[in-house]
Image (cartoon, rainbow, N blue to C red):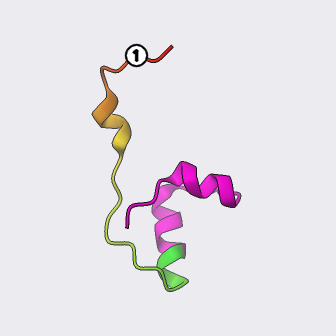
């Protein structure tokens, strides 16, 4: 299942980097298979 960091921020306060969060989730028993920076896919998008 893919979960965005923004979605998690709506549920809990996150103050760590994505890498640290991944490690903490793994320690807590949640398997983190990979991290993906989706912002690179929207390089040329303009919202406003």
Residue at (45% x, 61% y) in the render: 19
Total labels drawn:
1
- Estimate how packed mark 1 is, as few (under 14), some (14 to 19) or many (20 or more) residues with alpha carbons within 10 Å: few
Q: Is residue 6 magenta?
A: yes
Residue at (47% x, 68% y) in the render: 22
Residue at (35% x, 43% y) in the render: 38
Q: Is residue 23 magenta?
A: yes
- Which residue is disc 1 drawn over? 46
Q: Residue furthest right?
A: 13
Left or right for 1, reference 30: left
The stretch of residues the image draws in magenta is 1-24
Residue 25 locus on image (x, y percent): 52, 75
Vertical placement of residue 39 versus 1, above or below: above
Residue 48 locus on image (x, y percent): 51, 13
| Quadrant into which the N terminus falls | bottom left
Residue 37 locus on image (x, y percent): 36, 46
């Amino acid at each position: 299942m893919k979960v965005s960091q923004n979605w998690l921020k709506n549920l809990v306060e996150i103050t760590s980097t994505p890498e640290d969060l991944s490690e903490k989730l793994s320690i807590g028993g949640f398997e983190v298979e990979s991290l993906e920076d989706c912002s690179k896919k929207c390089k040329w998008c303009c919202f406003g």
